[in-house]
Image (cartoon, rainbow, N blue to C red):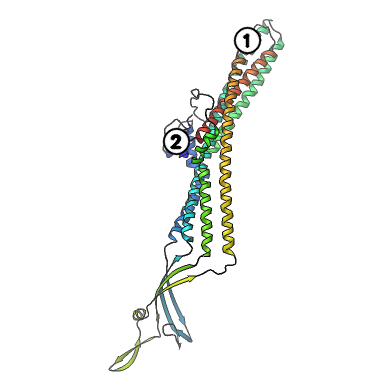
Amino acid sequence: MVTTMLLLSLTSFSQERNDSLQPSTTTWSLQQCISYALENNLSIKSQAEGLTVQKNTLNASRYGLLPSIDVNGTQSVSNGRALDQTTYQFSNQTVKYTNASLSGSMILFAGFQKQNSIKKNNLDLMAGLQDFEKLKNDISLNIAAAYLQILFNQELTKVADDQLALTKQQVDQTRKLVDAGKVVIGNLLDVQAQEASEELQLVDAQNNLYMSKLTLTQYLDLRDSLIEVSAPNLDSVLIVSVNVQSQDIYPIAEKNMPEIKSAEFRVESAQKSIDIAMGGYYPQLSLNVSYGSSYSDVREQVKLVNGVPTTEKYPFFNQMKDNANLGVYLNLSIPIFSGFSNHYNTSSAKANFQRAKINLDIEKNTLFKNIQQAYADAVASFRRYVSTKKSVATMQESYNYTQNRFNLGLINSIDYNTAKSKLTRAQSDLLQAKYEYIFKTKILDFYRGMPIKL
């Protein structure tokens, strides 16, 4: 399944045991983040318990085909004019009566409602399993996006730090030129202002990095400390033009995505609900069996002694044996009028069936739009990457040229700072385009059922 490939492929590292998901080192790999989340996420645990409820519902409906068996017992004491249940005669004394019975019943035919209920509950369980897989997919993709955001912010922070280091060198160099009388003090002040601005940019980058780490930490529900991630080598990722169309990806995704399978199962379940409602129009035939006996302490047993009839105490077990009775009954119930309940139940079931079909179409449309969007984002990020890569190369040459002229005192600090700012902005745009391209193409790979590797 695509879900299995996602969980196995969102990393280039080997699988580890669940009891060692939280590493002893200070950094987490992407696989460790995903595995830990799937093991500990509260939403996943909650939905797993919901699946247990659905399984119990299915098993209960299956065992509902078996006959029901009951054991009943009655012990009563009557005073005054009391009826002896064993002889159906009245007696003006205290009567102690005991009754025990074993009964069973089984529905032989009820419009196949029980059989269709089993099929419906099984389809509901299958839909729930697919919802469970979708939840795991969503969490895994969210973690992958948060993980890549940390990597992006780490590189962005490094760029800001490197640029600040260069500016600090430029401040020192300009100060020497001012002391030597080669440039005016204004140039030093401008470079120092640029240094202050870049210090602020570095602080912003560090704050963004902190917030992205906080986001991933919260996804994992960690409370001990802020997460630190291990950075895989992404330099080997080839950024090439997207060579697949969204309409080619959709048929593959439609067959594999759990949200589509879930909606399909719910359509079938809604069809079974119609069959269950229609079963209310059919007669119901049931079989009932009972076996029981009774005892009364006032009942006497008649015996012949020397040819003369005499009465004596009727022993308990003798009465229970003699009073034993067995009954077998067939009960047929034919619905004539049910207050239109069968009609409206069937009508509602048909409406739910149509709604389930509409929901399936909605899921398919949503999936197609998501693929379209991911494809468009991937293409746009590739074009942006190519454009910004050229821009960075041009800006770098321009900056080098401007820096040399500034060091010689041929241009003022404003022109130098402008060139440096353009280079920094272009480098940031290039990083953003790179990580957008990586994530969007991995999303396309996911929809195609291909392994996703960083």
- Residue 93, compared with residue 123, is above or below; it is below
Dot 1: what SS? helix
Q: Nearer the viewer, residue 33 or 347?
A: 347
Residue 75 x %, y %: 44, 77
**Identity of the amino acid at label 1?**
Tyr
- Gap between marks 2 and 1, in whole Å? 49 Å
Q: Nearer the viewer, residue 280 or 167?
A: 280
**Identity of the amino acid at label 2?**
Leu
Query: At 49% from the left edge and 54% from the top edge, which residue is drawn?
Result: 120
Dot 2: what SS? helix
Left or right: where does residue 188 sit relative to residue 388? Answer: right
Q: Is residue 119 visible?
A: yes
Residue 446 x %, y %: 50, 35
**Are the residues at dot 2 and dot 1 in contact (C-beta closer than 8 Å)?**
no
Query: At 59% from the left edge and 32% from the top edge, which residue is drawn?
Result: 211
Query: At 56% from the left edge and 39% from the top edge, which residue is drawn?
Result: 367
Report the residue marked by disc 2. 8
Residue 442 x %, y %: 52, 31
Residue 25 x %, y %: 46, 31
Report the residue marked by disc 1. 401
How busy is the neighbourhood of tag 2: few (under 14 within 10 Å), some, or many (20 plus)?
Answer: some
